C-alpha cells in the first residue's frame, strides 16, 4: 500500500501543505496564540522545517526527523509548550484549512484529520509544562 505522503503527491506536496499551514498561522486570527507558542521554542521558520521532517515519517515517508534527532516522540518535542484544548482546536482548524487549500481529496483528508486530531489532543497539557533541566 502506498504511503500517505505518496498519496498526497510526495514530499513536494507535503512541503506545500506545511508551508500553507504556517502561512495561515502567521496570517489568521486563530493563529495568534500558536504564533506565541512557537516562540517558546526556536520560532516559526524552524517549525516549518521540523514539522515537514516529522510529518514525512509520521505519514509513512522518509523519517527525516528521526534521522536528525534520533526519535519521533511528539510529547518530548512539545514538553516546553503549554498547550490547551483551544490551542489544539486552533491548530486543527488551520491545518484543515491548509489541507483544503492544497486540494487533498476528501477520503485522504478525512484520514489525515483523524490522525492529526488524535495527536493534537495527546499534546494537550492544560498549560502545564515540564521544567527544563
Image (tube, rainbow, N blue to C red):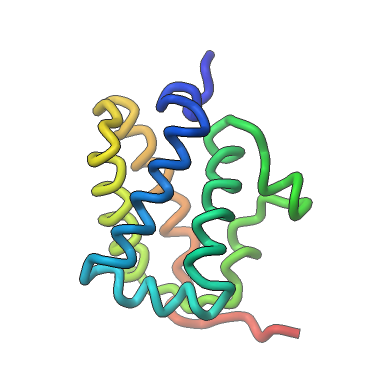
Give the number of marks.
0
Q: Quadrant of residue 126?
A: bottom left
Foreground of the two, 96 or 116: 96
Percent of width and height locating residue 86: 30, 70
For the C terminus, the image quarter is bottom right
* Residue under the point 33% across and 58% down: 23
Q: Quadrant of residue 89?
A: bottom left
Foreground of the two, 14 or 132: 14
Q: Please, is residue 129 above or below residue 17 in the view?
A: below
Percent of width and height locating residue 22: 38, 58
Percent of width and height locating residue 47: 52, 61
Q: Please, is residue 127 above or below residue 31 in the view?
A: below
| Extreme residue toward the top, this view | 1
* Residue under the point 42% across and 33% down: 13
Indicate left or right for 69 with 113 as reference: right
Foreground of the two, 47 or 60: 47
Percent of width and height locating residue 41: 57, 75
Amino acid at each position: 500500500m502506498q504511503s500517505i505522503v505518496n498519496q498526497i503527491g510526495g514530499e513536494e506536496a507535503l512541503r506545500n501543505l506545511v508551508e500553507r499551514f504556517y502561512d495561515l498561522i502567521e496570517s489568521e486570527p486563530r493563529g495568534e496564540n500558536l504564533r506565541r507558542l512557537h516562540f517558546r521554542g526556536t520560532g516559526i521558520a524552524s517549525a516549518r522545517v521540523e514539522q515537514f521532517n516529522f510529518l514525512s515519517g509520521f505519514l509513512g515517508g522518509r523519517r527525516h526527523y528521526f534521522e536528525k534527532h534520533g526519535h519521533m516522540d511528539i510529547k518530548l518535542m512539545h514538553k516546553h509548550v503549554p498547550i490547551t484544548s483551544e490551542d489544539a482546536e486552533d491548530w486543527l482548524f488551520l491545518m484543515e484549512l491548509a489541507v483544503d487549500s492544497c486540494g487533498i481529496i476528501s477520503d485522504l483528508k478525512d484520514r489525515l484529520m483523524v490522525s492529526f486530531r488524535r495527536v493534537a489532543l495527546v499534546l494537550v497539557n492544560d498549560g502545564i509544562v515540564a521544567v527544563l533541566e
